């Protein structure tokens, strides 16, 4: 097993991997969209976004649309690199 690249434990979570998979293909996505696509609860998604943000993998911005708060997420360059490395490592396991 030592020949295998280590899978990033931060990305090796269903919801965090789903978030990163969504964000890799878009400029940004709103919290509600991510919640809908991942099937996560609002509370769980908030925790997962905080973990990804703390790692520098995503950026989270908060604004208002009228009086309604809007949270928007986008993947960072560091996040893109981490995601690509994760996918490359995963490919080693399935080849």
Image (cartoon, rainbow, N blue to C red):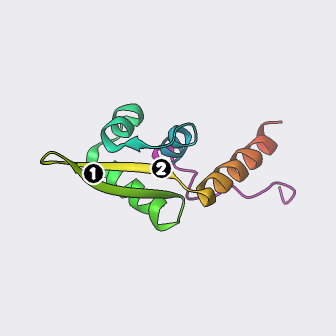
Find residue 8 and report its image quarter: bottom right
Sequence order check, earlier mark of 2 and 1:
1
Residue at label 2? 74
Q: Is residue 73 above or below residue 10?
A: above
Point out the stretch of residues depicted in magenta.
Answer: 1-15
Find residue 30 and report its image quarter: top left
Residue 9 lies in magenta, yes or no?
yes
Q: Is residue 62 above or below residue 28?
A: below
Residue 56 lies in magenta, yes or no?
no
Assign the magenta stretch its main secondary structure.
loop
Element marked by disc 2: strand
In the image, 29: left or right of 81? left
Element marked by disc 1: helix
Q: Nearer the viewer, mark 2 or mark 1?
A: 2
Residue at label 1? 43
Q: Nearer the viewer, residue 6 or 38?
A: 38
Q: Residue 49 location, x and y as percent?
A: 40, 55
Residue at x-position 50% and y-position 43%: 14
Point out which mark residue 72 bears.
Answer: none
Q: Residue 66 location, x and y as percent?
A: 15, 45
CB-based contact (under 8 Å), mark 2 and mark 1 = no
Q: Residue 58 location, x and y as percent?
A: 49, 56
Count of labels in the image: 2
Given the current orientation, which residue lies at the most extreme front position? 66
Q: Residue 5 location, x and y as percent?
A: 78, 56
In the image, 64: left or right of 2? left
């Amino acid at each position: 097993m030592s020949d295998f690249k280590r899978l990033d434990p931060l990305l090796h979570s269903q919801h965090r991997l789903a978030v990163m998979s969504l964000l890799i293909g878009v400029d940004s996505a709103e919290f509600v969209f991510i919640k809908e696509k991942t099937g996560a609860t609002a509370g769980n998604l908030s925790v997962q976004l905080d973990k990804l943000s703390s790692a520098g993998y995503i950026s989270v911005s908060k604004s208002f649309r009228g009086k309604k708060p809007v949270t928007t997420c986008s993947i960072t360059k560091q996040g893109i690199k981490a995601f690509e490395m994760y996918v490359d490592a995963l490919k080693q396991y399935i080849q």
